Amino acid sequence: MELRHLRYFTALAECLNFTRAAEKVHVTQSTLSHQIRKLEEEIGYALFDRATNRVELTEAGETFLTFAANALHEVEHGLLALKSADTITGELRIGATNTFNFGFIPQCVATFLSRHPDAKVSVEELSADGIRAKLHAGELDLGIAYRPAEPSDLWFEPLHNEEMVLVVAPQHPFANRRRLRMVELHRQKLILLPRVFATRLMLDECFRSAGAEPSVCTEMNTIAPMLDLVSRSQLGAIVSAASVPTSSGLCIVPLTHPTPIRIPGILRRRETKHTKQMRSFSSIVRKLALKRSDAR
């Protein structure tokens, strides 16, 4: 027995006329008649008396109508409950480091709002420490950042491994290199993030393990100005490949021995209830992060 059979049956029981009932359920009269007969054959009872010019419910039909109507009513309520559960309103508060605000977070927010147009999203660009502090204070729902260098009581979900690369202008001596060993950056002039960033501490450790000591002549705490300065000079910068726009005209050189790797992920308080907003946004972040990683 199919749900449509119950709809056909209740429509005919209401109209007691094959033509009007067929119009109500948007099928032909012959289709309706055929499906009603199939239903009667399946349950083993005649539901309608067609002996006279009028269509009338049989005693079995009267009995079955109550249960069929209740079943359809419950299904409709179930569908409404599903739609209600899928509706997301209210505000979602996101904290993201500069790297993620450079294209990735706007893409995630756009996807989220296209699915949940009644929701509101607020995004703050913060340092990793700022994100952790605001999560602890309950002022953010989710953070999008890199794995904390130190153990943390925050819950961290890794997304993928992200290799960092050397970025230089086309006229730089390293512009045409297919790859570069970290030791080759010894005494090279670089633009790096300040040491308040975990990424900088990770890079310093990579330099130490390679026996290299670059000349850090400029420190900047955001990526866009770093790339702008790279395009105007003979300086190099070490950033994630994803943060370099394809239209920048800059050259990307992979680094090896060792390869600097960061792990981006989702941060939230362990004791915070994982709301519908958080689950939906986290799902979008995972899928887009995977596409971003595969594209590289």
Image: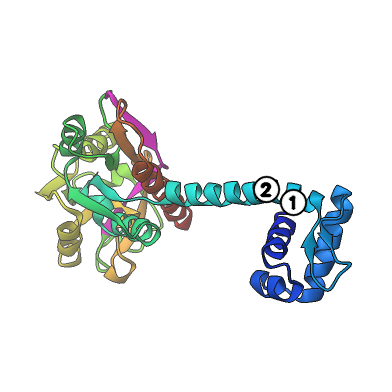
Q: Amino acid at mark 1?
A: Glu
Residue 39 vs residue 263: left or right?
right
Q: Please, is residue 124 above or below residue 27 in the view?
A: above
Residue at left offset 38%, top offset 35%: 157
**Percent x, y for residue 278?**
35, 42
Q: Tell me the SS state at disc 1.
A: helix
Magenta: main secondary structure: strand
Residue 169: image location, x then y, percent:
24, 65
Residue 51 seen anywhere in this rendered image of the structure: yes
Provide the residue designation for mark 1: 62
Q: How many residues crowd mark 2 within 10 Å: few (<14), some (14–19), many (20+)?
A: few
Which is more toward the observer, 75 or 174? Answer: 75
Magenta-drawn stretch contains 154: yes
- Span colored in magenta: 151-167
**Residue under numbered circle 2:** 66
Q: Position of residue 54 (x, y in %)?
A: 79, 70
19 sits left or right of 137 in the view: right
Identify the residue at image location x=26%, y=29%. 149
Q: Quadrant of the C terminus?
A: bottom left
Above-or-below relation of 2 to 202? below
Q: Quadrant of residue 161?
A: top left
The alpha-carbon separation of the residues under discs 1 and 2 comes to: 7 Å
* Label 2 secondary element: helix
Assess disc 1: are there few (<14), some (14-19) or many (≥20) residues with their C-alpha within 10 Å of its C-alpha. Answer: some
Q: Quadrant of residue 225?
A: bottom left
**Identity of the amino acid at label 2?**
Thr
Q: Is residue 262 visible?
A: no
Nearest the camera: 204 or 55? 55
* Residue displayed at 60% across by 49% down: 75
Q: Residue at x 43, y 49 (%)?
A: 84
